[in-house]
Image: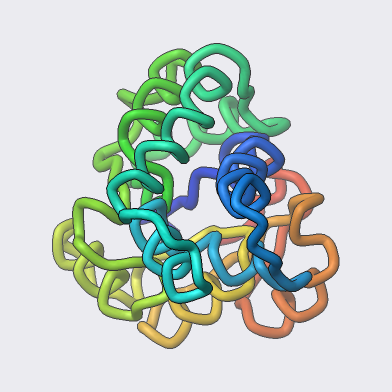
Amino acid sequence: MKTYLFDFDGTLVDSMPTYVSAMLKILDDNGISYGNDIVKIITPLGVLGTAEYYVKMGLDLPIEEIVLSMKKYMLDAYCYHIEAKKNVIPVLNELKKQGASLNVLTASPHVTLDACLKRLGIYGIFDNVWSCDDFATTKADPEIYKMAAERIGEPVENILFLDDNLNADLTAKTAGMKVCGVYDDSSADYTEEIKAAADYYIYDFSELLEIK
């Protein structure tokens, strides 16, 4: 593959515990109950999409207030503490050396996304760094993958999408992308389902170099 579209949380960086904690804290603080599948549901939605979903769940707060609270909860960890997952940085550098186009599409907002990638020294390695906010939709919508492909300038079927989330992998596959599932502890319970949905599956980022 020569064109890659990477998720961020749980794929490039070891941030899912922080991301999930920030997303769920506002429900916990307001006494809103949720099911065991909440992480699978909200992870592809982005901050705004998650806020809208919470309102439908019964959270009686303005969407803007929910979004600001989530970003506030996440900011310190992304700016100062979250690290890249094992072998991510050397593999990205090798792919870039080989002439690959590297791109990011994530539910995280730019305020945390950009700060984290810049601190890790890999922001500039990507041709495009996109939040769902840039497309005014979520990773639960097949159109976002088609729009990303159009902006990259490649047919959707020529792009390999990598994500640790089952719903995002299923949706990207529906949109016509090649899909590589990525192991993360947060989605370990869905490993077999992701394998069944994806074209490839990796436990360690170094395995990506074996996919041609």
Of residues 16 and 143, the one nearer the viewer is 16
Q: Residue at 56% across / 47% down in the picture? A: 26
The location of residue 171, given as percent across then percent down, is 46, 80
In the figure, residue 17 lies in which quadrant?
top right
Of residues 130 and 103, the one nearer the viewer is 130
- Is residue 13 something that shows in the picture? yes
Of residues 81 and 74, the one nearer the viewer is 74
The location of residue 172, given as percent across then percent down, is 44, 75
Total number of numbered labels?
0
In the figure, residue 86 lies in which quadrant?
top right
Q: Quadrant of the N terminus?
A: bottom left
Q: Quadrant of the C terminus?
A: bottom right
Q: Residue at 24% across / 62% down in the picture? A: 148
In the picture, measured across the screen, residue 198 lies left or right of residue 174, that is right
Q: Residue at 52% across / 18% down in the picture? A: 76
Of residues 35 and 138, the one nearer the viewer is 35
The location of residue 82, given as percent across then percent down, is 61, 23
